[in-house]
Image (spheres, rainbow, N blue to C red):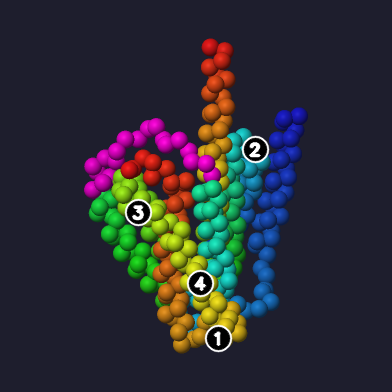
Amino acid sequence: MSGQACYAVLGALLFCLALHALVVADSNLRRLLAVNVLGSSVFLVLVAGARAADPLPQALVITGIVVAVAATALGLNLLLRLAAAENKDSGPQAEDPA
Amino acid sequence: MKGFSRWLLAGLLSALAVLLVYTVSVGVTPAADVPVAVSQSLPVSGVKHPVTAVLLNFRGYDTLLELVVLIIALAGVRCLAPLPPPQQGGPAGGVLRELASLLLPVLVLVAIYVLWAGSTRPGGAFQGGALLAGAGILALLAGRDRFIARIEQRLWPLASLGVALFLAIAAATLALRGTMLALPPAQAGILILAIEALAMLSIAVTLVALFLGTGELEETDP
């Protein structure tokens, strides 16, 4: 197996690992990270699966990375709001019984 | 039941893994020979690097819409309610400030070089923009709030510069040549460099603003 094909196989295995992490995740941050690793594994398969010196998958992956970064930033910002709202909700309740 | 569902998941994922590994290791012959087509059209693309030619010339639509995605993500973040300012973390230490003042000019210089290198070798607007955004985040962490606040005031004009020039060129090529984003070969090089320069600035500003969130800076730094 050539080195490049080896990377494509690694990408496929990474995809399954990330899918497992996504299914069993118990917090939203872990889900977001799992989706990120999932995306990275797809990029790995795209670049390694193509023939050497094919510029089209490389350009696609650069586009994909930028979109993934933007989506992750939006997701992290939403998670921060979610955590702030949960803290606000649980704050007074924690004080009530005391 | 918990144990059963865990085994079911493991079984399904193993089957998927076997299927995927088999799929990626099967050799496929593409219907069209893309690398040859790209290298044949490379002389009229205005740049010497095939990836840059694909990104900015042959598939300019993708890059234009990608810049729009960045702006949409920024709009989404700026629409959210501002968070309370973080409690921990005092002023930046002296080492960080000294390191930032050493690294910032170098980072800006390397970003401009990477942008310039994009026409002949790996590099371009996105790589340069990422470096420039790293410089911006370093400046933010080192307590250069006033510099970041000045960018913050002109956030939307700066963040939409790249898309604005790209759209203007798309409209001009549509009007003059009949095909959107069909860059004239003689001017393609300079047009691509102009698009990439403004796109790099917009990408960097957008990424720093995404890092910053909803801009709590204006309240903390009068």
Mark 1, Cα crowd under 10 Å, few <14 / some 14-19 / many 20+, is few
Residue B176 numbered mark, or none: 1
Is B59 colored magenta in this rendering?
A: no
Mark 3, Cα crowd under 10 Å, few <14 / some 14-19 / many 20+, is few
Q: Is residue B149 visible?
A: yes
Q: Nearer the viewer, residue A19 or B44?
A: B44
Residue A41 rendering spot, x and y as whole percentages: 58, 54
Quadrant of residue B176 within the rendered picture: bottom right
Q: Which residue is mark 3?
A: B150
**Are dots 1 and 3 on a single chain?**
yes
Instruction: Locate the N terminus of chain B by quadrant.
Output: top right
Amino acid, disc 1? Leu
Mark 4, Cα crowd under 10 Å, few <14 / some 14-19 / many 20+, is many
Q: What range of the chain is rendered magenta?
A: B80-98
Q: In the visual, does B64 lie left or right of B146?
A: right
**What chain does badge 1 belong to?**
B
Residue at (46% x, 76% y) in the render: B192
Amino acid, disc 2? Val
Q: Are marks 2 and 3 in contact (CB under 8 Å)?
A: no
